Image: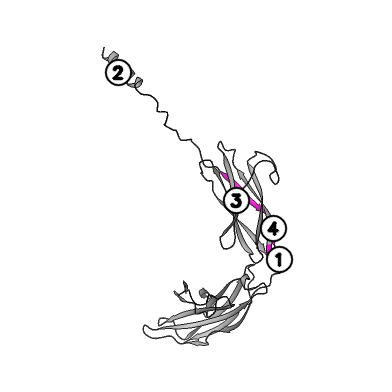
Amino acid sequence: MKLHRITILLLLVFAGCELDQSISFDRQSAPPVLIDAHISPVFINVSAFQSQPVIDTAITVTARLDSPSPFFTTVVYEVFDPSGALIISGALSDNGVAPDQTSSDGIYSATVRISVRNNAIGTFSVAVFARNAENERSVLYSLPLILFNSSNAAPVLTSLFAPDTVLVPSGSDVRLVKVSISAADSQGLNDIVSVSLKSMRPDASVAGLFPLYDDGGTIVQPTFNLSSGDSVARDGRYTLIIPIFSSTQKNTFRDFVFTATDRSTAVSVPVIKRVYIQ
């Protein structure tokens, strides 16, 4: 009798429960798996664009998924210039239309046209990843794209200003030492990426590597948390103020090695200045 009553009670409970049609069930999906991505070419010689204001070139981007996805999948490319700014983005296709070779084989391709100023050479970055309808993403491939100029000339450094001798201050005093040098480039000042100073100890070990600035001296630079001491911004004169503390070793010297690097990674002939510390 008790079993009969329990059975009747359960039937009444379930009979009063209706499936809520508003309840939605999550789709069970997994992020797409991108197992390969590459670009062609990787190196592009832009010397032919020297006399033109714009470099207009193209690359092929290809990516491969591990298997057909049960959900809608998009394979995306994003191209970043050497400063990290996004310049173009889009989607690759698996439709058998060139440059893609075979439809629905899991290999996605695209021709990407890149138009940049003719001085925007250096290492670009091409990011490739896949995402499904739920915006779940695959691992991201970051591929270098190098635009270089084979007829490029390295920067030239001239007119160095640096002291012959630096006196170490006493107590809590700080002595500020100013160094500056002029840099020129046949491709223009915009082709110069950096001017740096490498401080070498007498045993030829590196004491420090410091950037010089052509910023007009209006910005507190992170190198020493000081103004660079530069006078005129973007005039090709690069400057740095170096603080000397009482703890600095005396009766020795440092060889200051100055170099400039351009967007094609060409490095100037170094300029070396020996500075005695007393």
Q: Give how far apart the Cα atoms at labels 1 and 3 are.
A: 27 Å
Q: Are marks 1 and 3 in contact (CB under 8 Å)?
A: no
Amino acid bearing label 2: Leu
Q: Which residue is mark 2?
A: 9
Q: Does the magenta run of residues contain 11?
A: no
| Circle 1 SS class | loop
User: Quadrant location of residue 238?
Assistant: bottom right
Q: Which residue is mark 3?
A: 77
| Circle 4 SS class | strand
Who comes first in sequence, dot 3 or dot 4? Answer: 4
Query: Alpha-carbon neighbours of circle 4 within 10 Å: few (<14), some, or many (≥20)?
Result: some
Viewer-proximal residue among 122 and 203: 122
* 182 lies above or below 90: below
Q: Are marks 3 and 2 in contact (CB under 8 Å)?
A: no
Q: Give how far apart the Cα atoms at labels 1 and 2 are.
A: 87 Å
Query: Would residue 239 be visible to someone looking at this image?
Result: yes
Magenta residues? 33-54
**Coordinates of residue 273 in the picture (x, y in percent):** 56, 83
Q: The N terminus lies in which quarter of the figure?
A: top left
**Coordinates of residue 55 in the picture (x, y in percent):** 68, 62
Q: Are marks 4 and 1 in contact (CB under 8 Å)?
A: no
Q: Give how far apart the Cα atoms at labels 4 and 1 are.
A: 13 Å
Give the numbered dot on residue 52.
1
Amino acid bearing label 1: Gln
| Circle 3 SS class | strand
| Circle 2 SS class | helix
Who comes first in sequence, dot 4 or dot 1? Answer: 1
Q: Residue furthest top?
A: 1
Amino acid bearing label 4: Thr
Name the residue at 61% across, 49% down.
Answer: 90
Q: Residue furthest right?
A: 48
Give the numbered dot on residue 57.
4
